[in-house]
Image (tube, rainbow, N blue to C red):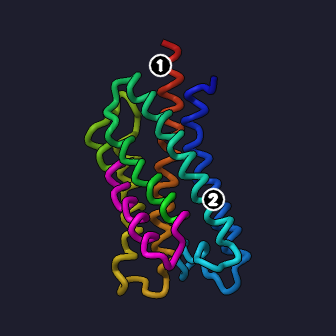
Amino acid sequence: MISNRKLIYTGCIIPLIFWIGIGYCGLITENYSFLANQVSDLGSIGTETQTLFTFTLVFISVLSIIFIYGLYKTAKKTGLNIIPILLILTYSVSIFGAGIFPLPLPLHGILGSPSMLLPLSPLLSILLWKESKIAGIKIASGLILLIMFLGFLTLMPDILTDYFGLKQRFFHLGWSLWFIYLSLKFTELDRKTNAS
């Protein structure tokens, strides 16, 4: 049987696969700019990278469910509120939808939008989780939340007008850091719980 720590460790693997996947797709896509173009352009219908992009997004969506399950198990064992963890499901749904329904299909935007609720995960962790259980949670969550919020600059076309891709990648950086942080902290929590 797979240990819970291995399930939680997928939180470190997901961002790695995402950034390598979109990095590779971007490098082989002609005239693609990481600063100007949105991530989803890499999986648009008819692009050379559509299949790889779709596979990457669907794969990390499945891994995110495994990650959430690992976090959930540890949270239940340690008495942590599970709401910040369950909010990560918005990522799972969004990344799956964005992969299965490529641009310019209308469902790409519709199914990709639940991730706008993802910042509630670090926000509610500030309110619901105690420092005594997860040291440094308030500061880390606050910083990650700030980075995620920078991603919402995509909703403000007059700011960094020519850098939509850069603005969008702030959001991706934010969730990546959140997943890695949770993975490391919950692995530590899991270890302590099993030791006691």
Quarter of the image for residue 156 reads: bottom left
Quarter of the image for residue 42 reads: bottom right
Q: Amino acid at mark 2?
A: Thr
Residue drawn at point x = 46 percent, y = 74 percent: 167
Percent of width and height locating residue 151:
41, 68
How would you classify the magenta stretch by its main secondary structure?
helix
Q: Which residue is mark 2?
A: 56
The one of 136 and 112 positioned closer to us in this rendering: 112
Q: Which residues are magenta?
A: 100-121
Q: Is residue 39 above or below residue 187?
A: below
| Marks 2 and 1, the one that precedes in the sequence | 2
* Picture disc at residue 193: 1
Q: Residues within 10 Å of mark 2 (few under 14, many from 20)?
A: many
The one of 97 and 81 positioned closer to us in this rendering: 97
Q: Is residue 184 left or right of residue 110?
A: right
The kind of secondary structure element at disc 2 is helix
Residue drawn at point x = 47 percent, y = 52 percent: 92
